Image: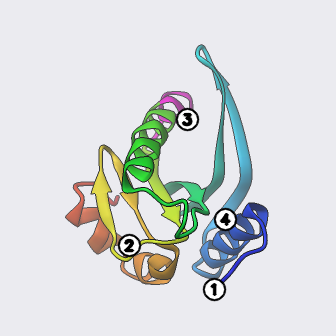
Amino acid sequence: MSFSSWQEFEEAIREILEIHGFSTKFRYVFKDERGKAEIDVLAERYSLVLAIDAKRYTEGWYRLSAIKKEAEKHAGRCRRLERLAGGKVIPVIVPLIDDVIYFHEGSIIVPFSKLNDFLLNIHAYLHEFGFDAD
């Protein structure tokens, strides 16, 4: 699947989350003592809150080190949001390219092609990566 813009990519992620019953907030901005931060898509279903950071890297520009660096930054943003919200926020990076779901430095990396599977089996994945799903 190809996307002509990063906005189109983020919209596709949002649509998939909503199909799975999540209510979403798009380009969610919050402010704390460290300043402003943005979450591409904030998704909530029951007590589960996912903070999605979309990465539309292409084959020619993709680097595993870039995804890992973004995962670390995103986990930090989510910890900041947790302090404000008073509840658990699960950091998820959704790159356009990649082939497996894995965990790095606090964030779950879910390739776009695996997003549906991740959402269908979310509690198993959260358990696998050490998140309390309740």
Q: Main secondary structure of the magenta part?
A: helix
Sequence-wise first label, 4 or 2? 4
- The mark that comes first in sequence, 1 or 3, is 1
Q: Which mark is residue 60?
A: none
How many neighbours does mark 2 have within 10 angstroms: few (below 14), some (14-19), or many (20 or more)? some
Mark 3 — residue?
A: 85
Label 3, secondary structure: give it.
helix
Tag 1, which secondary structure? Answer: loop
Picture coordinates of residue 99, whole percent (x, y): 37, 77
* Separation (CA) of disc 4 from disc 2: 16 Å
Q: Amino acid at mark 4?
A: Ser
Q: Amino acid at mark 3?
A: Ala
Q: Earlier in the sequence, mark 4 or mark 1?
A: 1
Residue at image x 42%, y 72%? 98
Q: Does 3 sit above or below residue 105?
A: below
Whether pointer 4 and pointer 1 mark residues with C-beta atoms closer than 8 Å, the reply is no
Q: Which mark is residue 122?
A: 2
Residue 32 versus residue 8: which sits nearer the camera?
A: 8
From the image, state whether disc 4 or disc 1 is nearer to you: 1
Disc 1 to disc 2: CB gap under 8 Å: no
Label 4 SS: strand
- Reading the chain from its start, which is encountered first: label 3 or label 2? 3
Query: Which segment is the magenta one?
Result: 80-87
Tag shown at residue 1: 1
Q: Earlier in the sequence, mark 1 or mark 2?
A: 1
Residue to which mark 4 is pinned: 23
* Figure quadrant of the C terminus: bottom left
Residue 110 is at least partly visible in this image: yes
Q: Compared with residue 45, is residue 112 higher up or lower down, i.e. above or below?
A: below
Evaluate whether residue 132 shows in this view. Answer: no
Please name the amino acid that badge 2 sits on.
Ile
